[in-house]
Amino acid sequence: MRLVLLGPPGVGKGTQGRRLAGELGWALISTGEMLREAVAKGTPLGRAAGRLMAAGELVEDDIMVGLVRDRSAEPDAARGFVLDGFPRTVPQADALEAMLAERAQRIDLAAYLGAPEVELVRRLSGRLECPVCKRAYHRTDARPRDGRHCDDHPGVELRQRADDAEETVRKRLDVYRVQTAPLVDYYRRDGRLREVSGLGAMDEVYRSLKQALECPDPDPDPDPTSSGAPSGASSGASSGVSSDASRRARPGR
Ligand SMILES: [Zn+2]
């Protein structure tokens, strides 16, 4: 399975993607993490990307596609991969399709995790971290014992990351709405979209996600009787699981 994870900032894609990839033996391709790593290692790509990011510019699409091309060709991605953080725009999604088509591959499904904006703002703007150990807290969801200081560093006051300030969070959501939300329709049009509610406990969301993807069990029975095109009918809202009944063909090794 080659899967794209879609959803606004704060919906928990990263966490769900990591768990899914780990459990099913797929590679997790997190482009944000890869860029940070490349910059830290000082690879040629990292140096180029670092210059752009330092200048406040976006890393160009062809650099991003090159990154995904190389990473998705590694042995651990042979059974499948989960893309987190890419594509972010429709042109990037087109470039991704073209790159995979060179290998006679494609994105099998896109999973959209949704949640109301008010909840996303609450989650993101409530995040706090210890400046010493980087442990993550939340004003309401994961409070430190005394409400202000790191549990492990009693004198150290917790801080909010600059990009979690409420105003910045709203800007991030605006950028998402303009640039990335159109991808939901992009994958819905040809029946590849699965919608999952990102509300509720992490385990609950994870179960919905697996159900929506009809994830293979650890020992899947071969079922070549995949028939018909997806109906294209999808649940409009971000609640619950869209039940597109057609089972997709299992990707080859
Ligand atoms: Zn600490």
Image: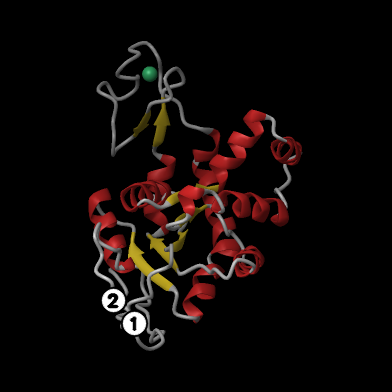
Count of numbered badges drawn on the protein: 2
Query: Which residue bears the numbered disc 1?
Result: 226
Residues at marks 2 and 1, CA–CA distance in whole angstroms:
7 Å
Ligand 1 location (quadrant): top left
The quadrant the C terminus occupies is: bottom left
The quadrant the N terminus occupies is: bottom left
On the image, the x and y values in percent for residue 219 come to 24, 60
Q: Residue at x 56, y 53 (%)?
A: 73
On the image, the x and y values in percent for residue 45 come to 71, 40
Q: Residue at x 54, y 62 (%)?
A: 177
- Give the residue type at disc 1: Ser
Asked whether residue 9 appears in the rendered view, the answer is no
Q: Is mark 1 on a helix, strand or loop?
A: loop
Query: Which residue bears the numbered disc 2?
Result: 223
- Give the residue type at disc 2: Asp
- Quarter occupied by residue 178: bottom right
Choose mark 2 or mark 1, whichever is in front.
2
Q: Residue at x 40, y 51 (%)?
A: 17
Q: Which residue is drawn at 38% across and 75% down?
A: 249
On the image, the x and y values in percent for residue 179 come to 60, 62
For label 1, being within 8 Å of ligand 1 is answered no
55 vs 98, left or right, is: right
- Quarter occupied by residue 250: bottom left
174 vs 78, left or right, is: right
Contact, mark 2 vs mark 1 (Cβ under 8 Å)? yes
Asked whether residue 186 appears in the rendered view, the answer is yes
Pick the front one: 206 or 124: 206
Q: Up-down: is 129 above or below 21? A: above
Q: Up-down: is 67 above or below 133? A: below
Q: Up-down: is 122 above or below 191? A: above
On the image, the x and y values in percent for residue 88 come to 58, 59
92 vs 116, left or right, is: right
